[in-house]
Image: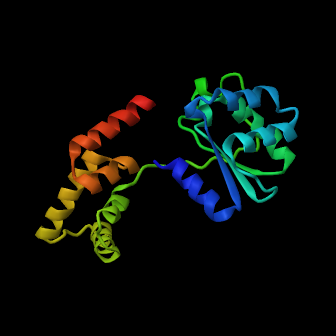
Amino acid sequence: IGKSTICEEFGKSEYKRFLLIDFAKKDKEVEMYFERYLNDLDTFFMLLQTHFGTKLTERNSLIIFDEVQLFPRARAAIKYLVADGRYDYMETGSLMTIRKNVKDIVIPSEEYHIKMYPLDFEEFLYANGLNEFAISAMRKKFECEESLDEPTHNKMMDLFRKYLLVGGLPDAVNSYLNDHNIQLVRDIQSEIHDYY
């Protein structure tokens, strides 16, 4: 649904610097930093900055743990990293509450959860170029339980059918908007499904 992109954009706009650690990449060197250096945070942060080529600024940098459910040791470390106070942290993950993703770790009380969802139909309409006036008119008709005129109804039904095929995942929607090729959309959906 674009969790990583949203976090990166937040890091760019709200902090002087940000660093993204993508645990889906299974970077053994970075994972080793978590295993060996959490009791020496000066060395830990120096190694991260060197590895990623990013100089962090205390109290004005964000470290993003992307797909943190794939490396529970990092998720468990949040408690100590937050207590250290040098940097701010965000975690992204999928299926974060499933038992296998929290096995053998204490969930840090420092975590605040925000649930994110794929695009809904109204957002899909915006992505397809419908203007606010058309969408609010449709919403008003729906709330009043009134029918749309036939051409508008047909257009909305066509878009709704496309929404059912494409779904609300940003990569699939962007692919559809760029190429209008449902097979490419299906390929993206399969990749996403296989990943999870």
Identify the residue shown where x is 29% and y is 63%: 128
Residues 85 and 53: in front is: 53
Q: Is residue 100 visible?
A: yes
Q: Quadrant of residue 58?
A: bottom right
Residue 92 in the figure: left or right of residue 139 = right
Residues 120 and 148: in front is: 120
Identify the residue shown where x is 27% and y is 52%: 176
Q: Quadrant of residue 93?
A: top right
Q: Whole-percent x and y of residue 139?
A: 32, 69
Q: How many numbered markers are drawn?
A: 0
Which quarter of the rendered picture does the C terminus lie within? top left
Q: Whole-percent x and y of residue 126?
A: 34, 65
Identify the residue shown where x is 65% and y is 26%: 28
> In the picture shown, does residue 31 fall above or below 127?
above
Residue 46 in the figure: left or right of residue 136 = right
Residue 190 in the figure: left or right of residue 183 = right
Identify the residue shown where x is 76% and y is 53%: 56
Residues 106 and 12: in front is: 12
Colour approach in the figure: rainbow
Q: Whole-percent x and y of residue 60?
A: 76, 59
> In the picture shown, does residue 136 fall above or below 26?
below
> In the picture shown, does residue 82 fall above or below 96?
below
Instruction: Work out which residue is located at the far left of the displayed protein and give it.
Output: 150
Q: Is residue 169 visible?
A: no
Residue 16 in the figure: left or right of residue 139 = right
Q: Whole-percent x and y of residue 53?
A: 69, 46
